[in-house]
Image: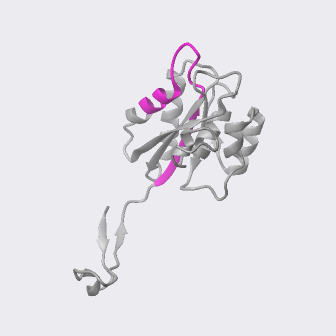
Amino acid sequence: MIRAEYPTEDDLKIGGARVCRVRIVSPLYEKVTIGIDDTDTREEGATWVLALKCAEACTIPGVEYLDMRLVQLNPAVPKKTTNCVGSALNFAVRPGKVDELLEYVRDFIEAEAVSNDTGIAVYRGIAFAEESPYLKRVKTELLTVDDAEAEAARMGVRFIDSTGRKGRIGALGAVLWGNKGVEAAGLYGETL
């Protein structure tokens, strides 16, 4: 916070039964959500561990790691690792630092991943303008990379991975679920 501004002297009076107004002034940040999937194999690695290590190791000035969300994907997918879970990282980023963050995340994840199918998806903004039907589909259907790429383009999500495309399905799912509640970690429709 930079400062708090009170519009009138009445807004400074202590006690109940009145309205007190305050304007909080803070530095400008942009919210960036990064979805990561398929960094592991059945034998080694775990996407959520790698994503967490990446976020915690980030020391870029003007980049604040907010949180990580684990996103349960469709467990019926035949070519999956142990749990079929994608990871979403949320950051608050100062102007001019987004490209540096994305380059850092891509380089860190791709250098440490043990899979050649890693997907990394990015959304810049607080919330989507509309809810995607992909929210349900990524947890209940068998999807193709083409499905994920088409929906990403429609929703304003871009991919920054360079190693493979299969992980883009779960990476997009992680971005879309990355700011939802605990239901992101469950099967579709499951009450947690």
Q: Where's residue 55, x and y in %?
A: 43, 36
Q: Where's residue 1, x and y in %?
A: 32, 61
Residue 189, by quadrant, is top right
At x 56%, y 38%, the residue is 71
Q: Where's residue 141, x and y in %?
A: 74, 36
In the image: residue 187, left or right of residue 2: right
In the image: residue 100, left or right of residue 77: left
At x 43%, y 43%, the residue is 67
| Above or below, 98 relative to 78 | below
Seen from the viewer's position, the closer of residues 92 and 176 is: 176
Q: Where's residue 122, x and y in %?
A: 58, 43
| Above or below, 56 relative to 178 | above
The residue most toward the left is 14
Seen from the viewer's position, the closer of residues 30 and 171 is: 171
The residue most toward the top is 43
Residue 17, by quadrant, is bottom left
Seen from the viewer's position, the closer of residues 3 and 95 is: 3
Q: Which region is colored magenta?
A: 30-54
Seen from the viewer's position, the closer of residues 121 and 104 is: 121
